[in-house]
Image (spheres, grey):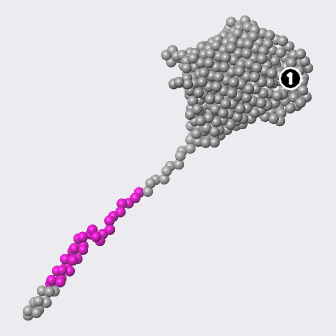
Amino acid sequence: MNIERILAALAMAACFSVSNSVVAQTTDTTQTTPAVQPVMQQAPAPEKPKKKSWYEIISIRGYAQIRYNRLLETNSKLKCDQCDKSLGENGGLFLRRGRLVFSGNVSDRVYFYIQPDFGSSASSTALNFFQIRDAYFDVSLDKQKEFRFRIGQSKIPYGFENLQSSSNRLTLDRNDALNSAVANERDLGIFFYWAPAEIRERFSMLTDEGLKGSGDYGVFGVGIFNGQTANKPEANNSQHVVARVSYPLQVGSKQIIEPSLQAYTGKYTITSDQLSEGVTIASESEAKDGFKDQRIAASLVVYPQPFGFQAEYNIGRGPEFDAATSTIKVKNLQGGYAQTMYRFKVNEQVFIPFVKVQYYDGGKKHERDATSHTMYETEAGIEWLAFKNLELTADYSIGDRTTRNAANLNNRQHGNRLRLQAQFNF
């Protein structure tokens, strides 16, 4: 009996021990149950950039100029076709320019610029027809657009005033001396421009703040172009070459001075439609291959803050009518201008009075018979920016011009006139 009781007690003790072990294992989950890992949510795929609509890429702007040139006129025969075809006899109200500018970045590296003009004239009896002035593309070689090629019809980088937009220029016409190098300032070509990003911003500021800048044609520019001037086909087998260096220096806290040097060389062909009956070309090789056409110019601009100064001078050789022989020969040419100005504000309106003197002695290759010119002119006037969409200019000029071609071997005219212009910016 004692042995049976002892065995029964041992069996009960064993069962109790096993039961406690199982309970301990089931209640202590820290060792046997693995930790729950957080569920990671997958990030949504980035949206593709939305393609811009055409109206987000293309900018449209423009300006128009309406003139009357005959107030206080003393000589109706004092004319200048290069300047303004409504000057003098039979001149009335005149739409000098009517331009629209379409421009924009079609990609990070390609920019386009197209500017037609509706104020052009086909002849003395046909006015206001559509003509392309600019049609070019800028291809940038780097993201900052410091290095770029310009391809198409654009302004030739020769002369500050030639590059300056007519909407920014103070006097109503460009000077004869440098503008006679490239009629309408443009031609078909390929140009390379370089300027550091900081200087590109400075070029933009000089135009955006109304300081009469020329725009961004680089610190250095070089290129080739046809040489027969805008909207005319090439007439020989060689291109012109041009180079320009210009740098806007900041002096003091805000004053900016911009010196420039530029030059070009090439051959210009006098075509048969430019020759009067009886006028010949002195050299057979020049008749076939074109006339030597070479110039070099220096420019200096002190931007009006508030006083400003602007001067340019060029020398060179080019085709010119010779009255003694009724032939066209290569002759020396020279001339330039100097201009002072003062910019001030009255409330929000801007006034810029100016005085300009100019001189030129040489041929104008794009005129009939490469007309010979000797001219002196003084202008005094004021530009009034009434508000950003309207500029009014009064310009009193005193001129003395002598031209020589087959129609008139010695046509000297001098006189005075007051010229008025309303410019609308839109």
- Per the rendered image, the range of residues in magenta is 12-41
Tell me if residue 300 is in the magenta stretch: no
Residue 319 x/y as whole percent? 83, 24
Say which quadrant the N terminus sits in: bottom left
Residue 90 x/y as whole percent? 75, 12
> Element at badge 1?
strand
Q: Quadrant of residue 21?
A: bottom left
- With respect to residue 102, does 122 lie above or below? above
User: Mark 1 belongs to which amino acid?
Assistant: Lys
Between 247 and 204, the residue placed more toward the observer is 247
Residue placed at 13% from the left, 90% from the top?
A: 7
- With respect to residue 72, does 322 lie above or below? below
Residue placed at 64% from the left, 32% from the top?
A: 219
Q: Which residue is mark 1?
A: 329
Q: Quadrant of residue 38?
A: bottom left
Q: Residue furthest front?
A: 252
Number of residues whose C-alpha sits closer than 10 Å to that of mark 1, classed few (under 14), some (14–19) or many (20 or more): many
Residue 359 makes an appearance in the image: yes
Residue 101 makes an appearance in the image: no
Residue placed at 69% from the left, 24% from the top?
A: 298
Residue 389 x/y as whole percent? 57, 21
Tell me if residue 18 is in the magenta stretch: yes
Number of marks in the rendered image: 1
Residue 174 x/y as whole percent? 69, 20
Q: Quadrant of residue 323?
A: top right
